[in-house]
Image (cartoon, rainbow, N blue to C red):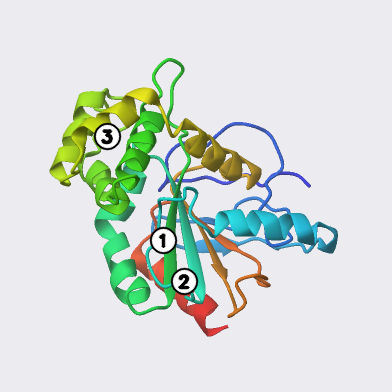
Amino acid sequence: MKKEKVKVKTGSKKITQNKKALIVGVVLIAIVISILSSMGGVSRTVIHDDSSKNSENRKILNELSNPAYANLTALGKDNAKVIMVEFGDYQCQYCKRFHSNTKDSIITNFVNTGKLRFLFKDFTINDKPGDKASTLSAEASYCAADQGKYWQYHDEIYKNSKGENVAWVTKDMLKQFASNVNISDMKTFSSCLDSNRHADVIAGNNNLANNLGLQATPTFILLSTNDKPQQYPQQPIAIEGAQPYSVFEQIIEKIYSS
């Protein structure tokens, strides 16, 4: 199956690798939803079932819908009917736009009402050879998770994000963010960051994103548990780019009511 060409105006740059896109939930597709215009129009591709891959797909769905690290928690109730997973990069300014303009409304209207469970997974597409600032930021977030401050630290990074590869990510700055969110043991946090202790977590998230065929940040995968978390019978939907709240609202409500 040829990869669909998608022009993205509300997400960070795409990966140029030429490979098939695997969106689990028994499908081989490219991006399911992409921008058609600056007015926020969306287009859905045809999703093709492949029952021979059910076991493999269920395994990937389980990885997709659970935190990547033992010290992490998702936002929302475990039995929420809709799961939304953001794949993002801390240097990505479209990711920052989503967090500044849209995330709080989703949390208020869907997470806090029990409809949605929200997770974040790293997709460090802005790393450069010799300057893996996106990975370093992500590692810092897991050092914060070790002290129960993952989401506070996550939000603090995006609050202070300055752009892609403009040298704002330093260990000193990341340690300052930890102080800003009241990390209690700064010595342990600094040791964790200096040791690259959580590099394998970020690598696992990147592998998952690549296996899904994701091309840009932010990309959001939404799926329904249909009250049967072990099965996830419905095919996932992908939203690419910092879409307006109305796009998320429409899709979440449709999944929730299905």
Q: Secondary structure at mark 1?
A: loop
Q: Crowding at label 3, few (<14), some or many (≥20) Cα neighbours within 10 Å?
A: many
Residue type pointed to by label 3:
Phe
- Tell me: 53 left or right of 112: right
Quarter of the image where one finds residue 146: top left
Q: Position of residue 150 (x, y in %)?
A: 31, 49
3D distance between C-alphas at marks 3 and 2: 29 Å
Which residue position is annotated with label 1? 74
In the displayed structure, 166 sits above or below 239; it is above
Which residue is most to the bottom? Answer: 257
Q: Position of residue 247 (x, y in %)?
A: 42, 67
| Circle 3 or circle 2, nearest the eye | 3
The kind of secondary structure element at disc 2 is loop
Q: Secondary structure at mark 3?
A: helix
Closest to the observer: 45 or 134? 134
**Residue hosting label 3:** 189
Q: Residue at x 14, y 42 (%)?
A: 180
User: In the rendered structure, which amino acid carries the disc numbered 1?
Assistant: Ala
**Which is closer to the viewer, label 3 or label 1?**
3
Q: Residue at x 63, y 31 (%)?
A: 17
The image position of residue 160, as x and y in percent, is 20, 40
User: Would residue 29 be found to the left or right of residue 149 on screen?
Assistant: right
Q: CA distance from mark 1 to mark 2?
A: 8 Å
Tag 3 near tag 2, CB within 8 Å: no
Residue designated by label 2: 78
Q: Locate residue 73, reporting x and y percent.
A: 40, 58
Q: Is residue 114 above or below residue 135?
A: below
Quadrant showing the C terminus: bottom right
Asked if residue 183 lies left or right of residue 89, the reply is left
Q: Amino acid under label 2?
A: Asp
